[in-house]
Each structure stands twice: as structure tokens, then as C-alpha cells.
Image (tube, rainbow, N blue to C red):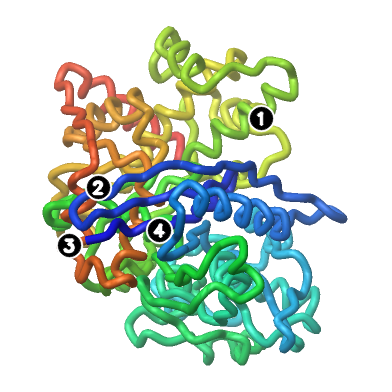
Amino acid sequence: MPTRNVAAVDLGAESGRVMLARFDGQYLQLEEVYRFPNRPVTVDGHRFWNIQELWRETLAGLRKARTVAGSLDSIGVDTWAVDYGLVDSNGELLGQPFQYRDQRTKGVMESVFARVPRQEIYAQTGIQFLPFNTLYQLAAHQRDQPEDLTRARNLLMIPDLLHSWLCGSQVTERTNASTTQCWNPVTGAWTTDLLARLDIPSPFLPPVVEPGTVLGEVLPELRAELGNPRIIAPATHDTGSAIAAAPFAQALGRGYISSGTWSLVGLELPHPIMTSEACEASYTNEGGICGTTRFLKNVMGLWLLQECQRQWHKAGQASDYDTLLAQADNVEPFAALIDPDDPRFLAPEHMPDTINAYLLECKQSPLQAPAAFARCIMESLVLRYCEVLLQLERLSGTPLEAVHVLGGGSRNVRLNQWLADASGRPVIAGPVEATALGNALMQLVGLGELRDLDEVRAIARATPTHTFMPRQEQRAAWNEAAQRFRSLKKG
């Protein structure tokens, strides 16, 4: 068969890239052809995504992908979840999309609960309670700028907005719709009655399509640059794409961590779990590929270290990531621990100072050396991962035999070995490019080259991975640290 060339646009909170995937019917090869920074902007104290700049860079990357490949068969976009753009009846964007770390949602979740109890919200949506969920963003939007919601013809999640600019589609893909806390995963419909109780209009909620859906062809005005590829919705939530590329022989008994700016710790199930226990523990049921459910918990992730590095760079203390992690080997183990999911770490002005303030509150010594911060963050993340994995087993009734670490965090050898030691389970790291791989695989489904979950996973299993086995001699130290970790969270 002729080689298929697909362009996977993968936008993250820190950067974006365009990956060229070539598929010859048996093997898929990925090549990064373009990378660019994602620089949010702050205006009048609010954080926004610079969506026009992201669009400009996306087009530049797609032009290069076409040049490298000769021609493109399809294009698909994935990004982070929950954020959206509102477009009017002319297709014009009503303002810059807010960034999920913007402070406009502060206190909104609690005001929503005063009108609709959290148990009722969970019973309809099955989504973890996070202050930046689209539901609370819409409540803030209705409070501050109700005229936008009145004028809006469509609400488009960020990847749907870019798909719209590529081919004119006005739909949302299910994995991303499921993150909004405005979608019912059981009925497969928007929760318009819930929105009505919060005085949030819902006519702008678009039709929802499955991953692998062909959305259309490139608009005529873009064909000179891009040719005439089809636009295909992958799992447009980047975690959905990452889990699509998990190299599971079978998903049962396999936990996963999609590791990057955020850590999404979960397992793949055939159906959602929306029990009162899952609600109390605030676990989420997000859509997966081929009708699956991603039952998971959001953990703060490597954002903590990324923000520390940003501050050190400003202060002239910059060191590259690999050097910093190597220096952490010389720091005393478990000298300082934090709860990575403490709300103060979501969007602080100065992450190292915020961590030290937390440590002082918990009667621990503040840190000075960047390597000490790095060790504290990574050990604390491992301990939090272990907590979540145990909760996943209890809530799902599924013993976890191994954990797959997917995405950029799979390169972090220390984090993966420590997780194996602390959890007592093998940790399978890779693929590193899970998100772009999963994006490309679902485009191949749309092109008719792959038919089902088994065929998608067969290609995913061909990618390199590395297994970290637990070291029993380290287990006692991790168990003792886990007891300290639990006590500081209770305090």
C-alpha cells in the first residue's frame, strides 16, 4: 500500500509541535518537524491563551510537514482540556480564550455547589471537582460577561476551534467534551438541565463526534499551502490521545500515568464508575477511544518543577533539566515532602517561595538549592501517585499488576524507578511521544487504515519501552516516607 502521511498537531501548556507520522500498513514512524513555544498572555490581570499566535505557528508547522512529506493525507489537533473559545454566527471569535489557571474561577466552584449539590453534579457528569473545569469557567463567564454567552453561536474547545479554522467544522470531539463537567457519559449528551439550573445558556453547545471522525477537507483558502488533506478529529484531549497509544496487551490490571505538566493517574475501563465513593474521592470518568472510559485522578505533575525552573531562570540560576535531576541524587532522601495537589500550587506567583511557605507551615525546613526542590517535588509526586493507585484499585475492584508511564515524564529515569520501588509494581516507561502517536493512530482509523482498538494497540505495542522493576531493599524507606506523607496531608 502507499505510505500514508498524517500530521499530528500536539499543543501543550508549555509548547506545541507538529509531528509527521508515516504509516506503510505495518509500521508507523514519527518525526518532529516543527516545535514552538506556547506563551500565554496576561491582560488586565487575567491569563489568556494567545490563540492567534498558536494558529500562526500551527500553520507554519503544517506547511513544513507538507514540504517534508510531499503531501499530507490528513491533519488532526489535540490540546489540553477544559478551555474554550466562543464564536458568533459569523464564525468570529468573541475574545481571547481564557487560560484555565486564570483566577476568575476562584470561589466559583463553591458558589455552584450552593445552587446544585456536588453529589448531583457528579451523578450527572462523573467528573473530578477541579476549579478550572469548563462548568465553573462558564459560571464565571456568565457572571462577568453574560453578553458573550448570549451572542455565542458555538462553544468550541481549543482543538475544535483550530479544526474549525482548518475546515469549517463546528463540532466537539467526545474525549474533550467529557472533561467539561457539562457532559453525561452514561446518556452521551450535554447536561443542559444542569446548566439551566445555573442560569447558563446551552444553545451554543455543539454536536459531539467520536475520535477518528472525518470533519471535512481543508478550506479552499488554505489549499495552496497545505494541499487537500482531510481534517480528522483524533482524541482531541491530549491525555485521550496519550492513552490511545498505551502499549497494553490488555488494559485490565494496567494502571497508567500520562506524565507531563499534569500527571493523569488512572486505568482504562469499559464503562464509567459514578458511585458515591468515586464522588467522595473526586475521581473522573473521561471519554476514551473506541467507547472506553478513562477513570483517573488529576495530580499536579511536573508543573511544580517547571515553575521552579522558570523562577530560577529569571534569577540567573538556570540549569538544564538533566543536570538538575542528576544533582538531586546528592540530596538527602525524603528531607522535605509536600502535597503536590495543595491548591496553592495551581498558579502561584513564585513556586519556590510557595513550596517553602508550605514546608514551614508543616514544620519542615525550607529549601535553598534547586536540586533539593527537585528531589522534594519528585519524591512527593511518587508518594501521591502511590496513594492514587491504591484508591484506583479500591474504587474499581481491579488489582493493578503494573503501571505504564506515558509521555515526556517517561524519560525521567529517577521518577520511574522510584515509583517502581515505592509501589512495588513494575513500571513500563514509554512511548515518550504517546500523545502524538495516539493522535496519528486515530487519524489512521479515520482514513480506514485501522479498524478497532485491537489494531490501534497493536501498532502502539511496536514502540520502544523500558521496564523498571521494584527494588525490595528500597521498600522500607518508601513505606516510612508514605506514613510521613499521609500525616502531613492530615495536618
Q: From mark 1 to mark 4, how far is it between C-alphas?
A: 34 Å
Looking at the image, tell me whether mark 4 or mark 3 is earlier in sequence order: 4
Left/right of residue 62 with respect to residue 25 in the rendered view = right
Q: Residue at x 45, y 82 (%)?
A: 208
Q: Residue at x 17, y 62 (%)?
A: 455
Quadrant that contains the N terminus: bottom left
- Dot 1 corresponds to which residue? 310
Q: From mark 2 to mark 4, how far is it between C-alphas?
A: 39 Å
Badge 4, how many Cα within 10 Å: few under 14, some, many 20+? many
- Dot 4 corresponds to which residue? 6
**Amino acid type, callout 1:** Arg
Secondary structure under the numbered disc 3 in the rendered image: helix
Badge 2, how many Cα within 10 Å: few under 14, some, many 20+? few
Secondary structure under the numbered disc 1 in the rendered image: helix
Secondary structure under the numbered disc 4 in the rendered image: strand
* Res. 399 visible in picture: yes
- Dot 3 corresponds to which residue? 455
* x and y, in percent, of residue 431 in the image: 30, 41
**Amino acid type, callout 2:** Leu
* x and y, in percent, of residue 320 in the image: 55, 19
Looking at the image, tell me whether mark 2 or mark 3 is earlier in sequence order: 2
Q: From mark 3 to mark 1, how far is it between C-alphas?
A: 41 Å
Q: From mark 2 to mark 3, how far is it between C-alphas?
A: 31 Å
- Dot 2 corresponds to which residue? 390
Mark 2 in CB contact with mark 1 (< 8 angstroms) = no
Secondary structure under the numbered disc 2 in the rendered image: helix
